[in-house]
Structure formats: structure tokens, C-alpha cells
Amino acid sequence: MFDFLASMLKVAKIPYTENAALAPKSTFKVGGKARLYITPQNPEELESTIAAVHSAEIPFFLTGGASNVVYPDGIYEGAIISTQSVKEIFYDPDEITPDGAVLVSCQCGTPMAAFVDFCTRKNLTGAEQFAGLPGTVGGAVYMNARCFDRSVSDILYSTKHIEFEGDKARQVEVPFNSEDWDYKKSPFQAPVASVKSQLYITQATFRLSPASPADHDRIAADCKKYIAERVDKGHFKYPSAGSVFKNNHAFGAPSGKLIDDCGLKGLTIGGAQIAPFHGNFIINTGNATAADIKALVQVAQKAVHDKFGFNLEPEIIFV
Ligand SMILES: Cc1cc2nc3c(=O)[nH]c(=O)nc-3n(C[C@H](O)[C@H](O)[C@H](O)COP(=O)(O)OP(=O)(O)OC[C@H]3O[C@@H](n4cnc5c(N)ncnc54)[C@H](O)[C@@H]3O)c2cc1C
């Protein structure tokens, strides 16, 4: 089946690598190898790739920046499809919504950093909090990423995705509907029984506010401030996938505080450690495996449940 898929990709001229090492491709620097690692170059190639993998009946995982995932140890007997080359940005300054917003559309693999830089260059305000967020637009939309009290859904205007009807794929544009979104929840996360009901984001359109030329320095300074805060908190000191567990605001204490109160900061299993500087970060101290990270997740969940009766919900995704 892998040979069949590889030959389909070759004919379609869609780039792929066989037996690709996964650790260097994720921010956690963890994982073995994937039988195929495919990098479609545009939304049409992304659609044909998903259709081809589907018809070859090969398990697959779609990834953007791989900044929220833990790749498996050993061999992943499937295909990793990376969107990172699908990264055009579209903007028409004359297209203004009735309430005065301007729209910036990003293909799914656009790095969030490139989107934020684009807004800064064009003097558009509203996305500053996302400066320094690793990963792509597709991943941020899927996760409904939240930074400094701002969620991606707060600035979303519409999304485009690929969906399957029978064996036919089509691209659909959906206007933002606030009822489908919540803290770290997006409609793209619905549990899926088969590829036919799963949705693959190809593009997101964001609403921004045009700022006056005098505001340019303020926008740039805010972006710098948010990045500096992440650096100060140690976000980039070690490989990680950011916060491991979602926060439950109703519970009243952030997950990192609960883990800290259980005395778990610094706890090490193999090459993975609960960061001594941040209870909700697990870091790779050099040779962590997915199994080490999973074990730490389970220890934290049990300790917090035993002490507080609260179930920590993982935010990171084990592929
Ligand atoms: C140092 C550090 C700091 C972080 N800080 C934050 C933070 O402040 N706030 C926060 O919310 N997160 C944070 N994260 C986590 C992570 O950066 C975000 O969740 C990010 O939005 C994930 O984007 P990605 O492209 O890397 O997605 P991936 O990790 O590649 O994928 C995440 C999920 O999205 C799905 N996905 C990706 N692209 C698509 C697509 N096109 N269509 C459908 N599904 C798709 C994947 O299948 C997977 O289920 C941090 C991570 C790190 C390493």
C-alpha cells in the first residue's frame, strides 16, 4: 500500500520522504520515523494527498508546525501530512466589512509568526497577542489557541476546509459562528469516525482593525512585549509542546498551580521532566520518548485527582 501511495504521489509530483525522522520536525524533538512524510505545496495538492492516502487506506495524521503534538516512538506505520508549504497570505485593503474591519486570509500552513508580522507591517491591530505562538494558522484554528486572554476565535471571520462526501472531496467556506467555539474548542475537533467526517482546514480569514500610522510602533512594541514575556517564562529554553493540560477556569486554579501544589515540579521520568519553572510544561531534557511524556502526564493526572478531585484534560496530542 505504501508503494502504491508513493507512486501516486510521484505521478502527481507531490513531495514526500520515506522513513522520515520525526523528532527534528516537532517542537518536542520526540518521535521515531514515519513510513511517509508528505509535504503538499498548495491546497489542491493537500486535497489530492488526503484523497490518495484515504483510498490507499493508510493511517495518517495532518500536522502544521507540530508544536502541540507528541510523535510516537518507533515506526509510525502511516503517513504524516505536513501543511507547512501551504502558506500564502491574501489581503485586500479596500475590502472592508460593514463594521469597519479588514480581512486577512492565510493558508493553513502559514506560520502564526508570519501572520502577526504581516499585520504589523500593514498596520493592522488585533493579532498582537499571538506574537511568539509557535505553529501554523491551521493548528491554531484547530486548537482555538489562546494567548494572553485572546483566543483565535476572537478574531476569526471565516474558515475554509476540505470535506469528503462519499469519495468526493470538496472545499467549503464557513462563516465564523461563535456557538461552535469555546475555550480551546473548535468545531474541527469533533470526534471522527472516519476520514469522511473529518474536516481539514485549508484557509482561515481573520478580522483586524486598521490602525493609524502613529500606532505602528505601538503594535510592534506590543508584539515584542508578548514574545519577551514568553522568553522570560522559559517557553523556549527546552523542547516542549507548551502547556500540557487545559486550564479549567471554573475550577479556580490554573493546571500548572495544581501540579505545583502536588510537589511535582522537576519530576523526571527518563528524558522528560515537569519543568522546574512551570508546572504545566513538560520539557525534553535531551532524550525524552513519547512513553516518558505519557508516563509524566499520567502521574500528574493521578496526583491532581487524588489531591483535588479534579481531572486534568491534556491539551497536547499523542499521535
Ligand atoms: C513554547 C510553546 C508555547 C506555546 N504556547 C501556547 C499558547 O500560549 N497558547 C496555546 O494555545 N498554545 C500554545 N502552544 C501550543 C501550540 O503552539 C499551539 O497549539 C499551536 O496553535 C499548534 O499549531 P501547530 O501548527 O503546531 O499544530 P500541530 O501541533 O501541528 O497540530 C495540532 C492539532 O491541529 C491539527 N491540525 C493542524 N493543522 C490542521 C489543519 N490544517 N486542518 C485540520 N487540523 C489541523 C493537528 O491534526 C493536531 O490535531 C505552545 C507550544 C509551544 C512549543
Image (spheres, rainbow, N blue to C red):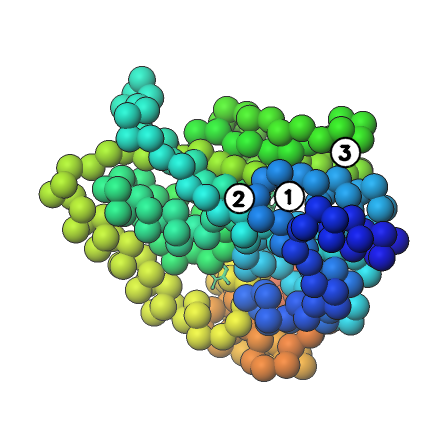
**Mark 3 highlights which residue?**
196
Q: On the rendered structure, is 149 left or right of 175?
A: left
Asked if the residue at label 2 sits under 8 Å from ligand 1, the reply is yes
Question: Which residue is nearer to you in this view: 116 or 276?
Answer: 116
- Could you tell which of marks 3 and 1 lies nearer the N-terminus? 1
Residue 244 versus residue 154 in the image, above or below: below
Residue 298 versus residue 287 in the image, above or below: above
Look at label 3 and name its amino acid. Lys
Q: CA distance from mark 3 to mark 1?
A: 15 Å
Q: On the rendered structure, is 159 left or right of 169?
A: left
Contact between labelled residues 1 and 2, with CB atoms less than 8 Å apart: yes
Look at label 2 and name its amino acid. Cys
Residue shown at 75% from the left, 68% from the top: 19
Circle 3 residues within 10 Å: few <14, some 14–19, many ≥20: some
User: Which percent across, then down, holds residue 78?
Assistant: 79, 57
Circle 1 residues within 10 Å: few <14, some 14–19, many ≥20: many
- Could you tell which of marks 3 and 2 lies nearer the N-terminus? 2
Residue shown at 62% from the left, 29% from the top: 171
Q: On the rendered structure, is 39 left or right of 225?
A: right
**Mark 1 highlights which residue?**
46
**Mark 2 highlights which residue?**
108
Which mark, residue 231? none
